[in-house]
Amino acid sequence: MLKQLIRPGIVIIIGIIFMAVSNPSEQKFLDKVSAEYGAVHGGTSFSHADLLQMGESRCQSYFIFSTYEYEFGTIGVRYVGFLFSIFNMESYRNDEILEKKEEVIV
């Protein structure tokens, strides 16, 4: 009976540790921002230092996944990172005149 509980417990613990280690870093998110900016604007790319100087960056780690938001002027993007992968959650534009957020199709 005890062996039946130990094996699944070990597998679950190893899985959680793997997910925590595979959580993307802020540098990986900045790579994604730079690549997507280059794809939209004809191959132009920025270094991480340039991106951090021009815009505002927020990265939050939640142990097994992380979220990232980058804002440059009135536009911004949100990502979620999980298992070495980064997924685009939302692209938006802050419309300062109307005080609302609008989705931007990328």
Image (cartoon, rainbow, N blue to C red):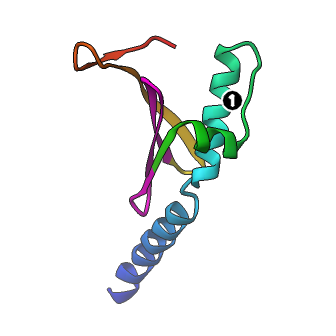
Q: Is residue 51 left or right of residue 43?
A: left
Q: In this view, which residue lies farthest toward the right? A: 43
Vertical position of residue 32 compared to residue 105: above or below: below
Q: Is residue 39 left or right of residue 101?
A: right
Q: Which residue is mark 1?
A: 35
- In this picture, residue 94 sits left or right of residue 42: left
Residue drawn at point x = 68 percent, y = 40 percent:
50
Mark count: 1
In the foreground, 19 or 48? 48
Where are the magenta residues, as a range?
59-81
Residue 101, quarter of picture: top left
Q: Main secondary structure of the magenta part?
A: strand
What residue sits 35% from the left and 80% below the top? 5
Q: Position of residue 91 (x, y in %)?
A: 43, 23
Residue at far bottom of view: 2
Instruction: Tell me which corner region of the image, top left, top right, bottom left or bottom right, holds residue 61.
Output: bottom left
Where residue 78 appears, x then y in whole percent?
A: 43, 34
Dividing the image into 4 quarters, which one contains the N terminus? bottom left
Judge whether residue 73 is colored magenta. yes
- SS at mark 1 in the image: helix
- Residue 100 image-quadrant placement: top left
Asked whether 62 or 96 is in front, the reply is 96
Q: Position of residue 94 (x, y in %)?
A: 34, 22
Q: Is residue 18 above or below residue 87?
A: below
| Residue at 74% across, 28% down | 45
Q: Amino acid at mark 1?
A: Ala
Residue drawn at the location 46% of the way across and 30% of the way down: 77
